[in-house]
Image (tube, rainbow, N blue to C red):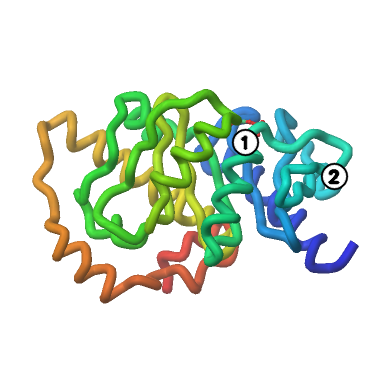
Amino acid sequence: MSDGERQKREAIVEHCKALNRTGLNQGTSGNISIRHEEGMLISPTSRPYDSLMPEDVVFVDKAGNPTGHFAPSSEWRFHRDILLHRDEVNAVVHAHPTYCTTLAIMGKSIPPIHYMLAVFGGSTIRCAPYEIYGSPELSELAVKALEDRKACLLAHHGMIAVGSSIEQAFWLAGELEALAKQYHGCLQLGEPPLLSEQQIQDVIAKISEYGLTSVKSPENKGLDA
Ligand code: 13P
């Protein structure tokens, strides 16, 4: 195994554990992939993260054929399809964080309530309609909801964040949950006022890379740039 592959396997394990440690996920929900050669490395299905080892990570090729001693995540299909559709994406994080999932259950996209929405590439975080987990239909809807964006919600399910690196995708997952919590809080008080499309575009022009280059680990969330 090359050093590069070993590092990717270790990064998947480290970030799976961090998903639970940071409260972004619970139990064995959620999964993480990193682009590798002509396919991806992905967390195995239904394995407790606490005991996950780098060798448990599964390689899945472009056609969906797995290599490994466990089966790949049941969501390998949307990870594979996102990586196939998005050349600039190298890592995908899927989880069921409480506030993202609360909004997703209500079928709500996140509107431009805060300028940090701009780091996701546009003025809304879309919520993909419900389809059963692991299905080609869910994958198609997820890829569509992610168009020109670095994250989306999945109705009655959770969220997906993508990045040029696993560190970036993980950081964005945390930012998304913060926005979801803020939106949930706003909704307790009424319908919040929104930023305009132009205001979001101005932020995109100003800070499109804000914090994204300094992200190094789950503990360094990139806000110290
Ligand atoms: P896996 O354990 O198969 O990765 O599935 C967890 C999950 O979150 C499904 O959406």
Q: How many marks?
A: 2
Q: Which mark is residue 75?
A: 1
The type of residue carrying mark 1 is: Glu
Above or below: residue 210 compared with residue 219: below
Say which residue appears at 78% left-offset and 45% top-offset. 57
The reply, left or right, for residue 70 in relation to residue 199 is right
The reply, left or right, for residue 172 in relation to residue 183 is right
Q: Quadrant of the N terminus?
A: bottom right
- Work out whether mark 2 precedes mark 1 in sequence or the reverse, and give the earlier one: 2
Q: Respond yes or no on whether mark 1 lies under 8 Å from ligand 1.
A: yes
Q: Which residue is mark 2?
A: 67
The answer, for residue 53, to whether it is visible in the render is yes
Residue 106 in the image, given as x and y percentages of width and height: 30, 25
Q: Respond yes or no on whether mark 2 lies under 8 Å from ligand 1.
A: no
Tell me the SS state at disc 2: strand
Number of residues whose C-alpha sits closer than 10 Å to that of mark 2, classed few (under 14), some (14–19) or many (20 or more)? some
Above or below: residue 60 compared with residue 36: above
Q: Which mark is residue 11?
A: none
The reply, left or right, for residue 113 in relation to residue 146 is left
Residue 15 in the image, given as x and y percentages of width and height: 63, 50
Above or below: residue 126 compared with residue 121: above
The answer, for residue 13, to whether it is visible in the render is no
In the rendered image, which quarter is residue 73 located in?
Answer: top right
Say which residue appears at 17% left-offset and 29% top-offset. 188
Distance from Cα at disc 2 to Cα at disc 1 = 16 Å
Q: Residue furthest front?
A: 63
Say which residue appears at 70% left-offset and 56% top-offset. 11
Q: In the depicted view, which residue is nearer to us: 81 or 186?
A: 81
